[in-house]
Amino acid sequence: MLQFFVKRLMALVLTLVVASGVIFLCLEIVPGDPALYMLGLNAQEDTLAALRAELGLDMGPVARYWAWVSGMMVGDFGISYTYRTPVAEMVAERLKVSLPLAIYALTLSTAIAFPAGIWAASRRGRGADIAVMGVTQLGVAIPNFWFAMLMVLVFAIHLRWFNAGGFAGWEAGVGPVLKSLTLPAIALALPQASILARVMRSALLDSLNEDYVRTARAKGLSRGQALWRHALRNALIPVLTIIGLQFAFLMAGAIIIENVFYLPGLGRLVFQAISARDLIVVESVVMLLVFAVVVVNFLVDIAYALVDPRLRGRG
């Protein structure tokens, strides 16, 4: 198990190093000058030079890359070109919205998908199975932003159970915060729950056809007992992969939902930074999201080893 852990940890570090280089290089070759964008086309050359020196843009690419990476290692993401505030403070403020939203949506997705997938697999070919698969197909097909706007019309404007948008702020308490995030979380969760439920059903059906399940049935276990005691644990391996990918998507891909509900999260921050050509914010937030994706995949690998002991010996 220790060897497995060390190898996965080394892969995590290597992935982060390569990702940081790719992100920096991609933003480095993007045309345009942030200083010229900030001061306008009529800015004097000496003013531009002074601003470039203040922002650190006069250094070479290697020096800028090292300054950025070494700063991130100690929690210093640099200073925003546009807002003139530390990027770390901006990211921390937006994480208070995006991280709870992602966790909330993932919790809803898992809570819906697991029972639906198991129920459909245990009733393969019956009306319940067909109904679950039909609903999940609809959930996959419907765009989440359209569903989000529909929920705003129904639950915010017509029924007035929730606010149409905005974030209450943590100083208002947990209740108002959860109320602010409920509609966005549902809009994000339902398409993901549809995918996860279908994967759970397929994985369970594959496990139920394995020899060890047939042996358990031959020893007198019912189909339900064989499913819960033997098939479910093995079916969790592909499901854990999807859950890890979904969390990464919910952290990085919620920009449309955040704009629909006017949530001040990381998605909107990246969008605003790209519009203002605030490259230090873009590369820092993207690197943070990459870090979240890599760490989640690392935790999924560890969960693999806990679920399937055979993986521990393979390293």
Image (tube, rainbow, N blue to C red):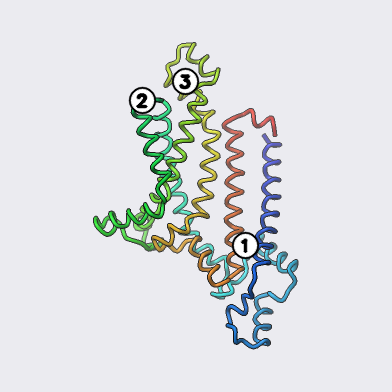
> Label 2, label 3: how many angstroms apart (C-alpha)?
19 Å
Q: Amino acid at mark 2?
A: Arg
Of circles 2 and 3, which is in front? 2
190 shown above or below 221: below
Q: Say which residue appears at 54% left-offset and 21% top-offset.
A: 210
Q: Say which residue appears at 56% left-offset and 75% top-offset.
A: 84
Packing grade of label 3 (10 A; few <14, some 14-19, many >=20) is many
> Label 1, label 2: how many angstroms apart (C-alpha)?
55 Å
Q: Residue 67: percent from the left, percent from the top?
A: 70, 67
Q: Residue 223: percent from the left, percent from the top?
A: 43, 19
Q: Pick whichever of labels 2 and 3 is earlier in the sequence.
A: 2
- SS under mark 2: loop
Marks 3,1: beta carbons within 8 A: no
Residue that label 3 marks: 226
Q: Pick whichever of labels 3 and 1 is earlier in the sequence.
A: 1
Residue that label 2 marks: 126
Residue that label 1 marks: 75
Q: Quadrant of the C terminus?
A: top right
Q: Quadrant of the N terminus?
A: top right
Q: Is residue 112 left or right of residue 231?
A: left
- SS under mark 1: loop
